[in-house]
Amino acid sequence: MLGKSAIVAFAATTRPEEAKAFYTGTLGLALLEDTPFALVFNAGGTALRVQKVPAFTPLPFTLLGWNVADIGATVQALAAQGILFERYGFLQQQDNGIWTAPDGTQVAWFKDPDGNTLSLTQGLPGD
Protein backbone atom coordinates (compact mmCIF):
# COMPACT_ATOMS: atom_id res chain seq x y z
CA MET A 1 0.00 0.00 0.00
CA LEU A 2 2.81 2.48 0.86
CA GLY A 3 5.50 1.04 -1.39
CA LYS A 4 5.34 3.99 -3.80
CA SER A 5 4.88 6.71 -1.20
CA ALA A 6 7.78 8.87 -0.03
CA ILE A 7 8.96 8.24 3.49
CA VAL A 8 9.49 11.02 6.04
CA ALA A 9 12.19 10.54 8.68
CA PHE A 10 11.81 11.91 12.22
CA ALA A 11 14.23 12.86 14.97
CA ALA A 12 13.89 15.08 18.03
CA THR A 13 15.79 18.01 19.48
CA THR A 14 15.67 20.00 22.68
CA ARG A 15 18.29 22.36 21.21
CA PRO A 16 16.93 23.48 17.83
CA GLU A 17 19.58 26.13 17.09
CA GLU A 18 22.39 23.63 17.68
CA ALA A 19 20.54 21.00 15.66
CA LYS A 20 20.04 23.47 12.80
CA ALA A 21 23.76 24.32 12.76
CA PHE A 22 24.73 20.64 12.93
CA TYR A 23 22.42 19.32 10.21
CA THR A 24 23.10 22.23 7.83
CA GLY A 25 26.65 23.30 8.60
CA THR A 26 28.24 20.00 9.60
CA LEU A 27 26.23 17.46 7.61
CA GLY A 28 25.38 19.73 4.67
CA LEU A 29 21.62 19.17 4.57
CA ALA A 30 19.47 21.92 3.10
CA LEU A 31 17.07 23.51 5.59
CA LEU A 32 13.61 23.53 4.01
CA GLU A 33 11.60 24.89 6.90
CA ASP A 34 11.95 26.17 10.47
CA THR A 35 8.61 26.28 12.27
CA PRO A 36 7.73 26.44 15.97
CA PHE A 37 7.26 22.67 15.80
CA ALA A 38 10.14 21.31 13.70
CA LEU A 39 13.17 21.86 11.54
CA VAL A 40 12.72 20.22 8.14
CA PHE A 41 15.76 19.24 6.08
CA ASN A 42 16.26 17.67 2.66
CA ALA A 43 18.24 14.49 3.29
CA GLY A 44 18.99 13.17 -0.19
CA GLY A 45 15.40 13.68 -1.32
CA THR A 46 13.88 12.45 1.95
CA ALA A 47 12.28 14.94 4.31
CA LEU A 48 13.91 14.82 7.74
CA ARG A 49 11.69 16.44 10.38
CA VAL A 50 13.65 17.24 13.52
CA GLN A 51 10.86 17.87 15.99
CA LYS A 52 11.34 20.58 18.61
CA VAL A 53 10.48 18.98 21.93
CA PRO A 54 10.81 20.14 25.55
CA ALA A 55 12.48 16.91 26.72
CA PHE A 56 13.35 13.44 25.48
CA THR A 57 15.81 10.61 26.02
CA PRO A 58 17.85 9.53 22.98
CA LEU A 59 17.24 5.98 21.82
CA PRO A 60 20.00 3.45 22.59
CA PHE A 61 20.37 2.48 18.92
CA THR A 62 20.83 4.07 15.51
CA LEU A 63 18.08 6.52 14.61
CA LEU A 64 19.17 7.63 11.13
CA GLY A 65 21.83 6.56 8.68
CA TRP A 66 23.27 7.52 5.33
CA ASN A 67 24.49 5.13 2.66
CA VAL A 68 27.71 6.66 1.32
CA ALA A 69 29.94 5.81 -1.64
CA ASP A 70 33.25 6.23 0.25
CA ILE A 71 32.92 5.78 4.00
CA GLY A 72 36.61 6.45 4.66
CA ALA A 73 36.51 9.82 2.92
CA THR A 74 33.19 10.74 4.56
CA VAL A 75 34.46 9.83 8.03
CA GLN A 76 37.61 11.86 7.41
CA ALA A 77 35.63 14.90 6.21
CA LEU A 78 33.23 14.79 9.16
CA ALA A 79 36.07 14.23 11.65
CA ALA A 80 37.75 17.35 10.23
CA GLN A 81 34.57 19.23 11.19
CA GLY A 82 34.77 17.98 14.77
CA ILE A 83 32.58 14.88 14.60
CA LEU A 84 33.69 12.21 17.06
CA PHE A 85 32.94 8.67 15.95
CA GLU A 86 31.59 6.23 18.49
CA ARG A 87 33.66 3.31 19.74
CA TYR A 88 31.99 0.09 20.83
CA GLY A 89 34.00 -2.41 22.87
CA PHE A 90 32.11 -5.37 21.42
CA LEU A 91 33.11 -4.50 17.81
CA GLN A 92 36.51 -4.56 16.14
CA GLN A 93 36.69 -1.06 14.66
CA GLN A 94 39.46 0.65 12.72
CA ASP A 95 41.23 3.60 14.32
CA ASN A 96 38.81 5.97 12.53
CA GLY A 97 35.77 4.19 14.03
CA ILE A 98 34.74 2.18 10.96
CA TRP A 99 33.55 -1.38 11.61
CA THR A 100 33.52 -4.00 8.86
CA ALA A 101 30.68 -6.52 9.13
CA PRO A 102 31.24 -10.17 8.17
CA ASP A 103 29.52 -9.49 4.80
CA GLY A 104 31.94 -6.62 4.04
CA THR A 105 29.52 -3.78 4.79
CA GLN A 106 31.28 -0.93 6.60
CA VAL A 107 29.60 1.20 9.27
CA ALA A 108 30.59 4.14 11.47
CA TRP A 109 28.45 5.82 14.13
CA PHE A 110 28.31 9.36 15.51
CA LYS A 111 25.89 11.50 17.52
CA ASP A 112 24.00 14.69 16.85
CA PRO A 113 23.89 17.50 19.47
CA ASP A 114 20.96 15.81 21.26
CA GLY A 115 22.66 12.41 21.49
CA ASN A 116 20.75 10.74 18.65
CA THR A 117 22.93 8.01 17.14
CA LEU A 118 23.49 8.48 13.41
CA SER A 119 25.44 6.25 11.06
CA LEU A 120 27.31 6.05 7.79
CA THR A 121 27.23 2.81 5.79
CA GLN A 122 29.06 1.66 2.68
CA GLY A 123 28.16 -1.59 0.98
CA LEU A 124 24.49 -2.07 1.78
CA PRO A 125 22.84 -4.87 -0.19
CA GLY A 126 21.58 -3.55 -3.52
CA ASP A 127 24.35 -0.93 -3.87
Image: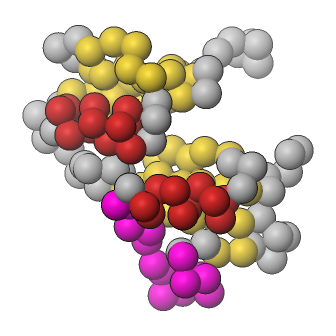
User: Which residue extends farthest left?
Assistant: 54
The percent coordinates of residue 92 (x first, y second) are 62, 87
Q: Main secondary structure of the magenta part?
A: loop
Instruction: Pick the residue in front: 126 or 57.
Output: 126
**Above or below, 115 relative to 27:** below
Q: Residue at x 56, y 47 (%)?
A: 65
Look at the image and name its color scheme.
secondary structure
**Above or below, 22 relative to 7:** below
Relative horizontal placement of residue 44, taking residue 88 as reference (left or right): right
For the question of whether residue 60 can be seen, the reply is no
The percent coordinates of residue 111 (x first, y second) are 37, 57
Relative horizontal placement of residue 68, taking residue 48 as reference (left or right): right
The percent coordinates of residue 88 (x first, y second) are 48, 80
The percent coordinates of residue 122 (x first, y second) are 73, 56
> Which image quarter holds the C terminus?
top right
Q: Which residues are magenta?
A: 82-96
For the question of whether residue 56 can be seen, the reply is yes
Q: Residue at x 82, y 70 (%)?
A: 104
Relative horizontal placement of residue 68, taking residue 28 as reference (left or right): right
Q: Count how many numbered circles sit on residues in the image.
A: 0
Tell me if residue 93 is in the magenta stretch.
Answer: yes
